[in-house]
Image (spheres, grey):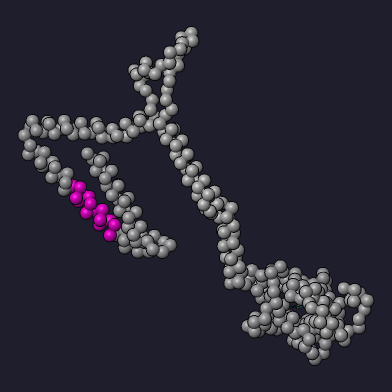
Amino acid sequence: MKTAAFLRLSGFAIFGFLFLNYIGTTGEASIFIEKPWLWGAYGILMLIYIAGEVCIAALSSILYRSLEPEKQAKYDEDLALAKENQFSWIKTTYKNLVGIKPVEEEGEIVLDHNYDGIRELNNKLPPWWVYGFYATIIFAIVYMVRYHVFDGTDQIEEYQIALAEAKIEIEEYKRTAKDLVDINTVVRLTEASDIDAGEGIFAGNCVACHKVDGGGGIGPNLTDDHWILGGGIKNVFKVISEGGRAGKGMVSWKAELKPAEMAQVASYVLSLHGTNPADPKEPQGEIWVDPMASVEDVEAMIKDQPVTEDIIKE
Ligand code: HEC
């Protein structure tokens, strides 16, 4: 009796916990984590349940004692019988599913051939196997109708849907996480806030060599059409991130500046293009032509420049 009571208590405890958890939890975390006082309520509930169990046990013990001796004996007998048959349905179901004939009844299914004393039993397929087989047939029909007759979403489509969703999520993430920019994804920033931030970074780190107006000193002029290492946002970002040619004085800034900051200062540098610095350094490097620029833009840019053969060719 004690084990049964213990089993009931555990069952009640587990069910109670899962039930409260299920109806109470709305957000991500379990209600037991969000509202720790619930543990107290749960504990009280358990105590009430145990008290109930104890009361019922006491009551039945009193009733038992009040019975006459023969009735007590009859009661014990009934109880023993009930206990014996307690899980009989499990045993019957198991036997039915396995479908094996007891050894005593094997005579009924022995086949009537006999090779040197070796005989064969006509055992049926075990029912669990047969039912499993029927289940696969039903499954196959449902599957075929769902995915091949009607237009169910098959694995490939599911995969493509997931892929499209992931792409949207990545775009979303990239838009919010600016520090994710690198040489491949960097674009020229035009927002005034970014340009202002870039100006601040430039004033703090770059003016010693490039001058406040970008006219150049130790470093080259950043306002003209000529670039030693290539113009455009990608090249400029790359020079700032990785540094210029070895030994020239332009170091890599990626340890000091975050990717987003390098994109800002690079955009600021590009915004200096075409301004007239006070004491510009003479042009260095080549005229850089954006491969994506329109013909008019390029013509306008090289209008005042000494045009050389190789520029026309490009
Ligand atoms: C110590 C001096 C020094 C500092 C500080 C410095 N630079 Fe430079 N910078 C140079 C030199 C020198 C070069 C030329 C590199 C070469 O020839 O390879 C250069 C080249 C460049 C170029 C490429 C120019 C071209 O013509 O291709 C860019 C863009 C640039 N620097 C931006 C910056 C920015 C932005 C900062 C601040 C974060 C900065 N520099 C800080 C010295 C400096």
Magenta span includes 118 = no
Q: Ligand 1, what quadrant? A: bottom right
Asked whether, in this view, residue 200 is left or right of residue 104, the answer is right
Nearest to the observer: residue 97 or residue 111: 111
Q: Residue furthest bottom?
A: 278
Image quadrant assignment for residue 223: bottom right
Residue 214, above or below 58: below
Give the percent coordinates (x, y) of residue 17: 33, 54
Residue 231 in view in this figure: no
Please determine whether, in this image, residue 134 is positioned above or below residue 182: above
Image location of residue 158, percent across then percent down: 55, 55
- 295 lies left or right of 189: right
Residue at the far front in the pictured view: 149
Residue found 57% across the figure and 65% down from its top: 169
* Residue 235 in view, yes or no: yes
* Magenta-highlighted residues: 41-54
